[in-house]
Image: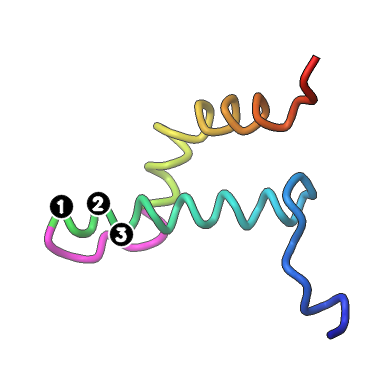
Amino acid sequence: MTSSHLPAQPGTPYGEFLAEQEEIQRLKWLVSEQEGHDIGFEFALNEWARNHRAEWRRMRNKLKRPAA
């Protein structure tokens, strides 16, 4: 297996991008289920960035800090 096939490491810029994308996809699925139709990625992205990203980032940063 080459390094290009290894999963992105958490904490790396690409790993963080993938983690955010996963959260956006999760929100897209949940809201689409509630609405009864596909809300689309762009709507989910804007909704997540506006209403969820700041708190998600805060929680994620807390988890990354080494224990004192």
Magenta region includes residue 28? no
Using residue 44 as the reference point, say whether residue 2 is left or right of it. Answer: right
Compared with 65, 20 (above or below) is: below
The residue drawn where x is 75% and y is 25% is: 65
Who's the residue at 54% across and 56% down the image?
Answer: 21
Dot 1 crowding, Cα within 10 Å, few <14, some 14–19, many 20+:
few
| Residue in view at x 27 percent, y 59 percent | 39
Residue sitting farthest toward the bottom: 1
Q: Position of residue 63 (x, y in %)?
A: 65, 30
Residue labelled with disc 2: 31
Disc 1 residue type?
A: Gln
Of callouts 1 and 3, which one flags the residue occurring earlier in the amino acid sequence? 3
Question: Does 5 sit above or below residue 51?
Answer: below
**Mark 2 and 1 residues: CB-CB less than 8 Å, in contact?**
yes
Horizontal and vertical percent position of residue 1: 84, 85
**3D distance between C-alphas at marks 1 and 3:** 9 Å
- Report the span colored magenta: 36-43
Q: Closest to the observer: 6 or 19?
A: 6
Q: Which type of secondary structure does the marked residue at label 3 adopt?
A: helix
* Other-residue count near label 3 (Cα within 10 Å), few / some / many at <14 / 14–19 / ≥20: some
Distance between the alpha carbons at the discs numbered 2 and 1: 5 Å
Disc number for residue 29 = 3
Element type at mark 2: helix
Query: Callout 3, which amino acid?
Result: Trp
Which mark is on residue 60? none
Residue 44 left/right relative to 33: right
- Name the quadrant of the C terminus: top right
Does residue 42 appear to the left or right of 14 in the view shown? left
Q: CA distance from mark 2 to mark 3?
A: 6 Å
Label 2 is placed on what type of residue?
Answer: Val
Q: What residue does disc 1 label? A: 34
Prevailing secondary structure of the magenta residues: loop
